Image (tube, rainbow, N blue to C red):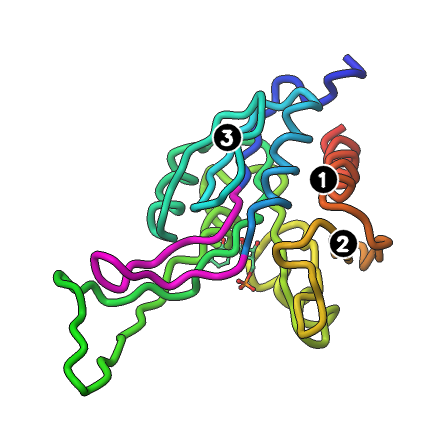
Amino acid sequence: TPRRPLAGRHAIVTSGPTHEAIDPVRYLANRSSGRQGHAIAQALAEAGARVTLISGPVALPDPPGVTTRHVVSAREMHDAVRAALPAEIAVMCAAVADWHVEPQARKLKKTGVAPTLTLVENPDILADIAHHPARPELVIGFAAETETLLDHAAAKRIRKGCDWILANHVGAGSDVMGGNDNEIVLITQAGADVWPRMSKTEVAARLTSRIIEALK
Ligand code: C5P
């Protein structure tokens, strides 16, 4: 029906940061608030999709009408995304940590010599889902860029094997990360589409319209 154009479709959305434990009490993280991913999950649900939101630690309520699974680390997020397949739509909005820390069983102690943390690369959830045998029909990623946004994001779309990339600026002077507004360039196989600055809720609505169009 026109009011629930995504009825019968399953969408997986990732959102928020991941936390990577340094020891039992400390972690590495980033400034992602989860606002954009949560807004996308809610917009897709309002359009009739069954939505599984896989969220890292955020201070936001679970969006209404969405099944939310809470995870902490990138490896937990990866497992939860794979367990949620199959789906027609995947929107990987989370700011996944690139590395985890080689595990320490005990709390690090201040000894006068600063400890060395050994970082180990995390799985790339977006690239994995884009190359999965049960790949969703539409795989969408984000690119938070600080420089030469368009070139980097277009190359990322190819490298990750996803269909679309929503690129945004997060450099110095930008208030996108953690803020209410977003500035998006949508990169598809057809080229780049520059969106005006708008709220994260409006970005979610506009992306949902594009998804509805693409799956028609
Ligand atoms: O490589 P980069 O982190 O810039 O790519 C960003 C995109 O890839 C986002 O869509 C993000 O959710 C996704 N990503 C991921 N798993 C990672 C790193 C990034 O799914 N380990």
SS at circle 3: strand
Quarter location, residue 204: top right
Q: Which of 23/80 is in front?
A: 23
* Label 3 Cα crowd, 10 Å radius (few <14 / some 14-19 / many 20+): many
Query: Residue 1, percent across and down?
Result: 77, 12
* Label 2 Cα crowd, 10 Å radius (few <14 / some 14-19 / many 20+): many
* Label 1 Cα crowd, 10 Å radius (few <14 / some 14-19 / many 20+): many
Quarter location, residue 28: bottom left
Q: Which of 155/20 is in front?
A: 20
Residue holding disc 1: 204
Image quadrant for the C terminus?
A: top right
Q: Residue at x 55, y 37 (%)?
A: 136
- Mark 2 and mark 1 lie on one chain; the one further toward the N terminus is 2
Residue holding disc 3: 52
Q: Residue at x 43, y 65 (%)?
A: 98
Q: Over which residues does the magenta segment extend? A: 14-31
Classify residue 154 as left or right of residue 8. right
Q: Residue at x 38, y 53 (%)?
A: 74
Amino acid type at mark 2: Leu
